[in-house]
């Protein structure tokens, strides 16, 4: 039996724009997905029930790539989540990453020798397959590497380059350079308060909505580029520990995402409620439901303000450990 885990993530800057090669930065959060894998004599099981591939497309895509194709025996898979589900916090990416680590460990890779770029690659391909072909590697790389991750179509001097990922999207090959952003000690003075509207954020639909907007109004690509510029400024601020400037970049991202039509009334209400006690606030992930985040030095007050307008909240530090094997026997 192997128990593995991977963290969820929040995108600080650059969601949607990253699908078009602009930089984006995400941080791993304290809430994790835990996956246990065990050989099963009763056929394939997920959470004790028979494995319905339609309900678990990410797991199905991972198993096809890493297990069943190589004649792996049926497994009993249990998934436990500390994340709000379908909320833009990267739960499917964390599942892919934790499953990849667990399968490698079952086949004999020691826990301290996990090939992180290989795990991130397989998890990205599986997530893209389950997400209708369009997915940047930001969620899967953050779940795998942990900490703070910057993804861009070019090697950025702002951060430490780790590996290259590529994928064919809409007939075009897209390449992303994946980096880690070193977070200074002073970052621990601030927390992220995550507010969930209670409505799921449909990632594939929102990514398709932005694709349709850009195809009907190609001049809107300028907004995608603006998000990229704000992200670079925000990343510099993040690595210098300039929390005020990180907050300003987050606010600006939210304004631009509103313009792309991916925010909604619930997200805007929570962002507005959080702002008086925060350094910055924005939707995080795909939008259209899901979550917002606020960067704050008063997490309890900010959480209360978000809850007063109907949000469910969770508090996290910025940056948590990436995928890991918890136990194996
Ligand atoms: C999803 O967490 C973020 C998006 O940018 C989609 C992606 O990067 O694949 C909306």
Image (spheres, rainbow, N blue to C red):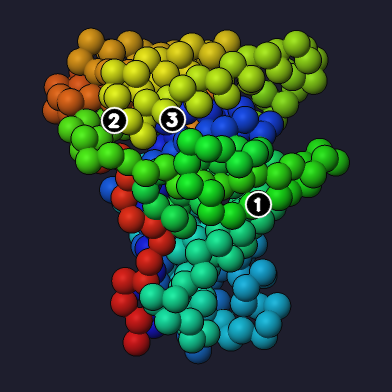
Q: Position of residue 3 (x, y in %)?
A: 36, 73
Q: Is residue 59 visible?
A: no
Res. 220 image quadrant: top right
Answer whether residue 14 is visible to the viewer in this image.
yes
Residue 328 is marked as: none
- Whether the residues at callouts 1 and 3 have beta carbons within 8 Å, the answer is no
The Cα atoms of the two marked residues, 3 and 2, are separated by 10 Å
Q: Position of residue 31 (x, y in %)?
A: 31, 49
According to the picture, the residue beneath numbered tag 2 turns out to be 241
Mark 1 / mark 2, whichever is N-terminal:
1
Is label 3 within 8 A of ligand 1 (CB to nearest ligand atom)?
no
Is residue 278 left or right of 263 when viewed as pictured? left
Q: Residue at x 41, y 61 (%)?
A: 323
Residue 4 place in picture, x, y as percent: 38, 69
The residue at which mark 1 appears reads as: 165
**Residue occupying the point 67% across, 85% down:** 71
State the separation of the CA atoms marked 1 and 3. Answer: 20 Å
Q: Under tag 3, what secondary structure?
A: helix
Disc 1, SS: strand
Local crowd size for mark 3, using a 10 Å CA cut-off: few (<14), some (14–19), many (≥20): many
Q: Residue at x 65, y 78 (%)?
A: 68
Q: Quadrant of residue 213?
A: top right
For the residue pair 287 and 147, the one nearer the viewer reads as 147
Q: Nearer the viewer, residue 163 or 317?
A: 163
Above or below, comparing residue 108 to residue 300 in the picture = below
The answer to whether the residue bearing label 2 lies less than 8 angstroms from the nearest atom of ligand 1 is: no
Q: Quadrant of the C terminus?
A: bottom left
Instruction: Return the residue found at the far front.
Output: 157
Label count reads 3
Label 3: which residue? Answer: 235
Could you say where residue 281 lies in the image, as x and y percent from the top left?
35, 20
């Amino acid at each position: 039996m192997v128990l593995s885990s991977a963290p969820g993530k929040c995108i600080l800057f650059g969601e949607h724009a990253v699908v078009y090669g602009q930089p984006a930065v995400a941080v791993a959060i304290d809430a994790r997905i835990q996956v246990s894998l065990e050989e099963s004599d009763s056929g394939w099981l997920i959470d004790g029930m028979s494995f319905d591939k339609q309900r678990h497309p990410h797991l199905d895509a991972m198993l096809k790539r890493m297990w069943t194709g190589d004649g792996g025996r049926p497994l009993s898979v249990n998934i436990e989540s500390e994340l709000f589900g379908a909320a833009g916090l990267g739960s499917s990416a964390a599942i892919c990453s934790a499953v990849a680590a667990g399968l490698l460990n079952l086949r004999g890779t020691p826990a301290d020798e996990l090939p992180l770029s290989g795990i991130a690659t397989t998890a990205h391909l599986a997530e893209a397959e389950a997400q209708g072909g369009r997915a940047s590697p930001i969620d899967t790389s953050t779940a795998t590497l942990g900490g703070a991750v910057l993804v861009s179509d070019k090697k950025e001097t702002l951060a430490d380059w780790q590996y290259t990922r590529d994928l064919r999207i809409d007939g075009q090959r897209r390449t992303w350079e994946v980096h880690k952003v070193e977070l200074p000690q002073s970052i621990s003075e601030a927390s992220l308060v995550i507010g969930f509207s209670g409505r799921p954020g449909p990632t594939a639909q929102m990514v398709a909505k932005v694709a349709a907007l850009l195809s009907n109004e190609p001049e809107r690509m300028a907004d995608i580029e603006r998000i990229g510029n704000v992200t670079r400024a925000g990343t510099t601020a993040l690595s210098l520990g300039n929390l005020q400037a990180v907050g300003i970049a987050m606010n600006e991202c939210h304004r631009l995402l509103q313009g792309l039509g991916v925010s909604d009334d619930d997200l805007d209400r929570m962002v507005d409620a959080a702002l008086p006690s925060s350094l910055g606030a924005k939707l995080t992930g795909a939008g259209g439901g899901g979550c917002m985040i606020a960067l704050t030095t008063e997490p309890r007050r900010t959480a209360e303000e978000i809850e007063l307008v109907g949000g469910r909240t969770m508090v996290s530090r910025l940056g948590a450990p990436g995928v890991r094997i918890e136990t194996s026997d």
